[in-house]
Image: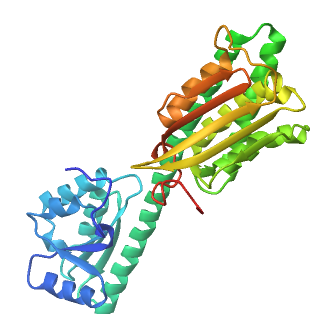
């Protein structure tokens, strides 16, 4: 016998009644139903099936509890999830050895909340006891949901930490390959880590799990504008990206910007950079992004690809699924990429990631 992680619809709100003799089950079922309590009558033969759904409360008469059924219920209680402690209401007779029955059940059913009532009892007493038991079950369900959420958050945190460490390791290795000396390695690696830190901080501070391309552009370019480099133009329609896609795009823009400052258009007072994006709607909406430099020194294609070029090719291809076009044109570097918006959209159910258009 096993207990599924997810209870059947409203299973924890149901009262399972095991009272096979006289008309006890019929009477209790009608009484509880009058107070809007969901009731499921059962027999000894189908008790195991009903227990497997994880009922809210079990109400039983002591004469229904054969040794085999006591063991069956004990087996179920042992394999309950950690958050569960099923309430059990037992109805006793005046003439029964009630002290012995209670001692036996308390020993056998260690992981349960037991309520004992002696018949005859007032209807309001039974209803009140069952409602109290259901309330206890509701609190247990809240604990379950809290535990599930905590486990989910821990898994998500573990996944993101792994991704961050992998990114840091990749950034270091690729920076190391292109560094001429230790000082250059330290400077370039530190700048890239700082860019990674900025985008993670901004995305986590934003509401939800998404960030717009406009926010990413501002996040990346504003530190350079504050340093007096204000010749960067960025424009496009409102588009939101998933957190991971936003991080990747920010790092790509950081690489392009630092390269433009060192060697490209932003190394000259008259140089300009334009970053634009647009949605191309055909059979499917595509996201197109383009980086274009003008007014800088004459561009010469490098003899070998450095970190920035290698990273851009890999990151942009992974982002949109299409190979980026990196053109070392003499009048200025151009980098363009296009691919399905659905690969990166932060709200695909609401216009494919386009907001406020």
Quarter assignment of residue 19: bottom left
Please state if 127 lies on the left or on the right of 318 as rendered: left
For image coordinates 25% across by 55% down, the residue present is: 76
Residue 142 drawn at (x, y percent): 46, 64
Residue in the picture at 28% in, 53% down: 4
Task: Say left or right for 314 vs 37.
Answer: right
Q: How is the image coloured?
A: rainbow
User: Residue 327: x and y, percent?
Assistant: 63, 23
- Judged left or right of residue 95, residue 245 is right
Vertical order, 128 against 77 (above or below)? below
Q: 285 or 135, which is in the foreground? A: 285
Is residue 169 visible to the viewer in this orientation of the structure?
no
Quadrant of image for the C terminus: bottom right
Q: In the image, residue 235 lies at what x, y percent?
A: 69, 49
Name, please, the residue furthest toward the front.
Answer: 331
Q: Quadrant of residue 27?
A: bottom left
Image quadrant where residue 134 sits: bottom left
Residue 84 position in % (x across, y down): 38, 59
């Amino acid at each position: 016998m096993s207990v599924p992680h997810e209870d059947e619809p409203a299973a924890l709100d149901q009262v399972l009644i095991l009272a096979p003799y006289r008309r006890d089950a019929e009477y209790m079922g009608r009484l509880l139903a009058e107070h809007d309590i969901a009731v499921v009558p059962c027999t000894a033969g189908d008790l195991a099936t009903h227990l497997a759904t994880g009922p809210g409360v079990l109400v039983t008469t002591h004469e229904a509890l054969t040794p085999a059924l006591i063991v069956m219920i004990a087996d179920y209680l042992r394999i309950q999830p950690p958050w569960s402690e099923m309430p059990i209401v037992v109805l006793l007779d005046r003439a029964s050895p009630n002290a012995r029955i209670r001692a036996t059940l308390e020993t056998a059913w260690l992981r349960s909340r037991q309520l004992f009532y002696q018949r005859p009892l007032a209807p309001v007493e039974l209803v009140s006891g069952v409602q109290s038991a259901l309330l206890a079950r509701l609190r247990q369900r809240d604990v379950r949901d809290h535990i599930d959420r905590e486990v989910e958050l821990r898994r998500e945190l573990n996944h993101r930490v792994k991704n961050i460490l992998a990114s840091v390791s990749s950034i270091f290795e690729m920076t190391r390959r292109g560094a001429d000396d230790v000082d250059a390695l330290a400077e370039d690696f530190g700048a890239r880590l700082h860019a990674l830190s900025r985008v993670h901080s901004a995305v986590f501070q934003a509401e939800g799990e998404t960030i717009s391309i406009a926010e990413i552009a501002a996040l990346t370019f504003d530190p350079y504008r504050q340093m007096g480099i204000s010749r960067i133009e960025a424009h496009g329609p409102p588009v939101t990206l998933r957190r991971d896609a936003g991080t990747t795009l920010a790092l790509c823009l950081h690489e392009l910007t630092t390269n433009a400052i060192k060697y490209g258009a932003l190394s000259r007072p008259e140089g300009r950079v334009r970053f634009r994006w647009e949605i191309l709607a055909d059979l499917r909406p595509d996201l197109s992004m383009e980086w274009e430099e003008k007014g800088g020194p004459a561009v010469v294609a490098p003899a070998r690809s450095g970190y920035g070029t290698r990273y851009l090719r890999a990151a942009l291809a992974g982002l949109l699924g299409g190979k980026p076009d990196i053109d070392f044109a003499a009048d200025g570097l151009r980098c363009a990429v296009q691919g399905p918006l659905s690969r990166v959209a932060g709200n695909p159910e609401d216009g494919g990631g386009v907001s406020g258009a």
